[in-house]
Structures are given as structure tokens and as C-alpha cells.
């Protein structure tokens, strides 16, 4: 079986409730017939972390964004309560409006992140020019 193909129907059909421990609590389990589908899903998740979430451009931009938010909150330019409920885009707009140098730097890294996102999208869509399709469900 090729890597990254997740048989979602088989995985969902194999989910079951099982007794967990001597106290009789119940938890979600997977029947033996769904183990390979679960392993495929876990491997695909690992590949996402390895190739996307841990990518140097993503980690760099995340670090810069967090630092910009901390500095803006410390300077009183952002309200912590509003930051916790806002999307990244809203916070970035507020940071940019307040003249944050780090926000401008993060915006500059977006070109690199676009490259990562475009590569991932090509992988998801099975574009042969970019290698193996890791996330073809079916």
C-alpha cells in the first residue's frame, strides 16, 4: 500500500467503544481491520509535521509573530483579551497598523510561506511534478 493513502471509510467503520480498565470506563477503540488505515493516517500526520509544520520558514515566521504580539501587548498596543479571541490575520493587521517592525518582517516571510503552501497544495492534489501524493483520501 502506498504511503499517505488513508481509507477513511474503513477507519470510521472500524471504530468501536471498548471497556477501559477494571472500573468499567469506556473509550474509543479501533478494530483490527482498521489498524492499517489508522497507521496510514498517523504516518500522514507525521509527514505533515516533518515537511510543513516544522519547515524552517514556518517556524521562523511563527517565532517572529509571537515576539511581535508579546512586544505589542507589553507596550499596550494590543489588548491581551482581544488577541486571544482574534485570528492571526486580525492580529497581524493590528500589529501592522501600530507600526510593528516585526509585523513587517513577518509579512516579508509570507512569500516563503506561500512557496511552502503551494508545494503542499501540489502534493495534496497529486501533482506529479512535486512528488508523491501524501493526502489522497479514498
Image (tube, helix red, strand yellow):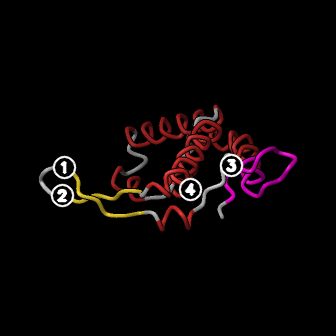
Q: Please say if the residues under marks 1 and 2 sit with CB atoms less than 8 Å apart.
A: yes
Along the viewing direction, whichever of 39 and 128 lies nearer the viewer:
39
Q: Counting residues from the N terminus, which is met first, the one under dot 1 or under dot 4?
A: 1
What residue is drawn where x is 69% and y is 43%? 113
Q: What stretch is highlighted in magenta?
A: 119-136
| Disc on res. 106 | none
Relative to 37, is 56 on the left or the right? right
Res. 113 in view: yes
Q: Can you identify the residue that label 1 sits on?
A: 21
1 or 4: mark nearer the eye: 1
* Distance CA(mark 4)–CA(mark 2): 42 Å
| Disc 2 residue crowd, few under 14, some 14–19, many 20+, Cα 10 Å | few
**Was residue 123 drawn as part of the magenta stretch in this picture?**
yes
Along the viewing direction, whichever of 14 and 47 lies nearer the viewer:
14
> Residue 74 placed where, x, y %?
37, 38
Q: Counting residues from the N terminus, which is met first, the one under dot 1 or under dot 3?
A: 3
Q: Can you identify the residue that label 4 sits on?
A: 89
Q: Please say if the residues under marks 2 and 3 sit with CB atoms less than 8 Å apart.
A: no
Specify the quadrant that holds the C terminus. bottom right
4 or 3: mark nearer the eye: 3
* Distance CA(mark 1)–CA(mark 2): 7 Å
Q: Counting residues from the N terminus, which is met first, the one under dot 4 or under dot 2?
A: 2
Q: Counting residues from the N terminus, which is met first, the one under dot 4 or under dot 3?
A: 3
Q: Can you identify the residue that label 3 sits on?
A: 1
| Disc on res. 25 | 2
Amino acid at each position: 500500500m502506498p504511503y499517505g493513502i488513508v481509507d477513511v471509510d474503513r477507519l470510521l467503520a472500524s471504530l468501536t467503544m471498548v471497556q477501559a480498565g477494571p472500573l468499567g470506563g469506556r473509550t474509543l477503540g479501533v478494530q483490527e481491520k482498521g489498524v492499517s488505515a489508522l497507521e496510514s493516517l498517523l504516518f500522514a500526520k507525521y509527514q505533515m509535521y516533518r515537511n510543513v509544520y516544522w519547515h524552517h520558514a514556518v517556524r521562523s515566521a511563527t517565532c517572529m509573530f509571537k515576539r511581535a504580539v508579546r512586544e505589542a501587548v507589553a507596550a499596550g498596543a494590543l489588548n491581551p483579551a482581544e488577541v486571544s479571541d482574534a485570528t492571526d490575520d486580525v492580529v497581524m493587521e493590528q500589529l501592522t497598523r501600530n507600526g510593528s517592525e516585526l509585523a513587517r518582517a513577518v509579512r516579508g516571510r509570507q512569500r516563503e510561506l506561500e512557496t511552502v503552501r503551494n508545494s503542499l497544495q501540489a502534493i495534496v492534489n497529486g501533482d506529479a511534478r512535486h512528488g508523491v501524493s501524501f493526502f489522497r483520501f479514498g
